Image: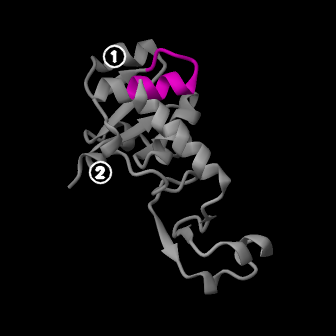
Amino acid sequence: MTRQQEIRFVAESALGKLAKWLRILGFDTIYEPEFSDRSFRDPGRIRLTRTLKTYRQLGGKSIIFITSDHYPEQIKQVIRELGITLQDVKPFSRCIRCNDPIHRVDKKSLPGKVPDYIWETHDTFLTCRRCHRIYWPGSHIAHSNQRIKQLFDD
C-alpha cells in the first residue's frame, strides 16, 4: 500500500473547496454533507475542522485545525502538517463529486453521453461507477497540474 492510499480525510462543511482539492490530489476525502457520525469516528481518517471547540474536544488526535479561510493556504497547511510530498499524490484519480475512484472507459460506449465535439476530439475518458460522471483531459488539467506543482514548490 502506498502512503497516498493510507491518508484519508473527513472534512467539515466549511471546507468544501479543500475537500474538492484533496480529491483532485487523489486522497479519499469525505465531505460533511456526505458523512455519518461513523465517518468522523473512523480512526483511519484525519478530521479537518475550522471549529476550535471540536479541535479542543478531540485533543489533537487525528485532527487538523485549519487556520486559513483561503483554500490554497488550507491545502498547503495539510501538506505541511502531514509531510505529504508530490510522490504521495495521484491527481485526477477520484471523482470530485462523490469521492469514488474513477476508471477508464471505452470511448465507444459514450456517444450521446458527452458533447459531440468532446467525443470527436478526445480518446481518453474516465468515469465514476457510483455517480456516472464522465471525465476527459480538458484544458483544465494543465492549469490544475500547474497549481499542484506550485503547492509543492514552496
The stretch of residues the image draws in magenta is: 66-78
Residue at x-position 57% and y-position 72%: 124
Earlier-in-chain disc, 1 versus 2: 2
Q: Is residue 96 visible?
A: yes
Q: Is 21 inside the magenta-drawn segment? A: no
Quarter containing the C terminus: top left
Residue at x-position 66% and y-position 80%: 110
Q: Viewed as shown, does residue 116 lie left or right of 1?
A: right
Decide: is 49 above or below 26.
above
Residue at x-position 24% and y-position 46%: 3
Amino acid residing under circle 2: Gln
Residue 87: x percent and y percent? Answer: 31, 45
* Crowding at mark 2 (Cα within 10 Å: few <14, some 14-19, many 20+): few
* Prevailing SS of the magenta stretch: helix
> Could you tell me which secondary element the residue under label 2 belongs to?
helix
Q: Is residue 32 visible?
A: no
* Crowding at mark 1 (Cα within 10 Å: few <14, some 14-19, many 20+): few
Residue designated by label 2? 5
Residue farthest along the right direction in this orientation: 116
Quarter containing the N terminus: bottom left
Q: Viewed as shown, does residue 1 lie left or right of 108?
A: left
The answer for how far apart the CA atoms under marks 1 and 2 are is 27 Å
Decide: is 41 above or below 66.
below
> Could you tell me which secondary element the residue under label 1 belongs to?
helix
Residue farthest along the left direction in this orientation: 1
Q: Which mark is residue 18?
A: none
Q: Viewed as shown, does residue 144 lie left or right of 77?
A: right
Residue designated by label 1? 57
Residue 153: x percent and y percent? Answer: 41, 29
